[in-house]
Image (spheres, grey):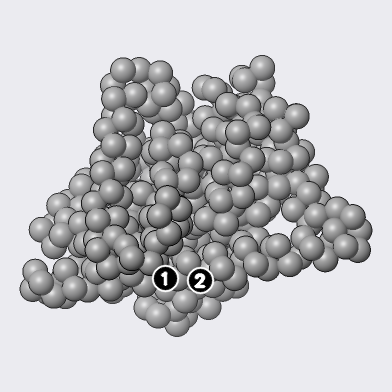
Amino acid sequence: MNVVFYITGLLLVLIVGLIVSVDRRKIRYKPIVIMLLTQLVLTFILLNTKVGVVSIGFVSALFSKLVDLGVTGVNFVFGGLENEGEYVFFLNVLLPIVFISVLIGILNQFKILPFIIKYVGIVLSKLNGMGKMENYIAVSSAVLGQSEVFLTIKDQMDDISKRRLYTFCTSAMSAVSVAIVGAYMEIIEPQFVVVAIALNIMSALIVASIINPYELSEEEDTLTIESKKKLSFFQMISESIMDGFKVAVIVAAMLIGFIALMNGIDYLFEMLFNVSFQTILGYIFAPIAFVMGVPWADSVQAGSIMATKLVTNEFVAMLSFREISAGLTTKAVGMISVFLVSFANFSSIGIITGAVKALSSKQGDEVAKNGLKLLLGSTLASVLSATVIGLFL
């Protein structure tokens, strides 16, 4: 049955993609097939081989240790404010982002991350036959996040075609930032976070290739990466600390606002219609979850979490998911977890539009015009990634 639902999930992504495709005749199916096969091989290795299990264990242990180290700094500053024996989300999950942000800054300062991202992207471009910059953006988005990635190509923004811009933004919205991966791993199982990050790189390119196909000339297929103004080591440390703190505070503010809003809407619906708003969303999204391969008994709850992520953000959905995950099947837990690991939600439209507009007003307007289509593409990428892991659970 897993194979059957993999096919139905794949057909869902393909059919919806074809319906909204700007030019079905230009779709190149060979790169799509190659990337689909790569996803299957990669997922099998990560979940079913000793090398994969050890690799995931190493990454999980690494981020767990980083979070623990981050908490030592948090405890020094806020330890007296924390109730003994109580788990405070802001202190234990969000503020350690500051420390991880510093480590990313150090890796960037010494050109380690840019080197890895660039050449992984080039290797992927040889594999899937897509542009070097397309693959670079897909890989770097998974590390830097949806806003920061565009700074690395800022001098080329005005010259990027509309179709290439769509592919870049779909990859950015389908990714996450390494700085907050540790926070994700505190809420959902780390193995699914690692697999999702790897799958989303390919999923975004696959979906973009269907919705927005194009071919590049040799002159267009170039890769020039801009580096930020060189700061002194301690300037970089200070800037990274502030960047990490801003992320933690922004996420906390979003959680306060969105969770209170969702609870308020639920209260109104229960008072007026005797049913929660999230339950209604669950029934709307349940067929999609089922077609992806989520067991029917779990499909309404899965649909509710998927919809919550779409209308709020992944953190709100993860916290809701954590409350119900114990009552779900292993397959449902894995698939929903993978679906949640991306920035595909309504608020990201504004974030990514602002990030691009800051670099190019013309291109920012183009992103805004295609905002809903970007959200559809990045959501389909999440659906595809969840469908792939469902085949192995």
Amino acid type, callout 2 = Ala
Q: Nearer the viewer, residue 324 or 109?
A: 324
Q: Which residue is mark 2?
A: 253
Residue 165: x and y in percent read 45, 63
Identify the residue shown where x is 91% and y is 58%.
273
Identify the residue shown where x is 47% and y is 65%.
251
Residue 228 sits in quarter: bottom left
Q: What numbered label is drawn on residue 249?
A: 1
Q: Secondary structure at mark 1?
A: helix
User: Where does the N terminus fall, quadrant-wise?
Assistant: top right
Identify the residue shown where x is 27% and y is 33%.
58
User: Where does the C terminus fall, quadrant-wise?
Assistant: top right
Seen in the picture, residue 141 relative to 33 is either above or below; the reply is below
Q: Is residue 292 left or right of residue 128?
A: right
Within 10 Å of disc 2 (Cα), the crowding (few <14, some 14-19, many 20+) is: few
Assess whether mark 2 and mark 1 are in contact (beta carbons under 8 angstroms): yes
Residue 17: x and y in percent read 64, 47
Q: Secondary structure at mark 2?
A: helix
Inter-mark Cα distance, 1 to 2 = 6 Å
